[in-house]
Image (cartoon, rainbow, N blue to C red):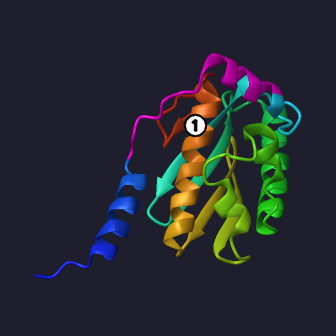
Amino acid sequence: MIINKRALSLFLVIFSSTSVTAIEKASDARINEVAQLGKHVMPFDLNQTLHIFTKVKNGGVQQVIAKNAQNKTQISLIREHLIKIENDFKQANFSDPEKIHGKDMPGLEALRNAKLGLITIHYSEIPDGAKITYLSKDAKLIIAIHQWFDAQLRDHASHATMHRMHHQTK
């Protein structure tokens, strides 16, 4: 049986990037810096909300929820922000994450330089917030989405989690 080395390498890269791995959190100084920068970009309160990242084989889903499902103010602010993000990202405008996480944020350059239409970006509301789904058929862009999710998990630490490993407070 002949194995195409390039196909095998690509499979391993995609498989390893979609596996659930422990993300090492950033330093406390970095987490505080990101939280401060985030106040200028995200209208909702990081301490009252949670970012949830789910990697899928062809991209990922980013949810932002209010920890208290009755907090209509935070839910409204989350939705307002994610609608803006969807509109910006559809035009390859990734300036908001750059303002928070920096120009060299992993995955960001590939996302910013992707040809329009190679990433499907879709906003939708969920009961306690909103979500954006990012999908692509391009292996490099899928890897970039996963790297971008990992970087956000690292920088947001207690304000973010992978998958649905969270609980809401009443």
Can residue 60 be seen? no
Q: Where is residue 35 drawn, in percent x and y?
A: 76, 26
Task: Name the quadrant containing residue 38.
Answer: top right
Of the pair 105 and 155, the residue shown nearer to us = 105
Q: Magenta span has 33?
A: yes
Can residue 85 be seen? yes
Q: Identify residue for label 1.
A: 153
What residue do we see at 53% from left, 64% from top? 142
Badge 1 density bin: few <14, some 14–19, many ≥20, Cα 10 Å: many
The segment highlighted magenta reads: 20-36
Please, what secondary structure does the residue beneath circle 1 have?
helix
Q: Where is residue 101 drawn, in percent x and y?
A: 72, 39
Task: Name the quadrant containing residue 49.
Answer: top right
The answer to whether residue 60 is left or right of residue 115 is left
What residue do we see at 86% from left, 39% from top? 41
Question: Which kind of residue does numbered mark 1 sit on?
Answer: Leu
What residue do we see at 85% from left, 30% from top? 39
Quick one: which residue is furthest to the bottom in this view? 2
Q: Classify 82 as above or below 87.
A: above
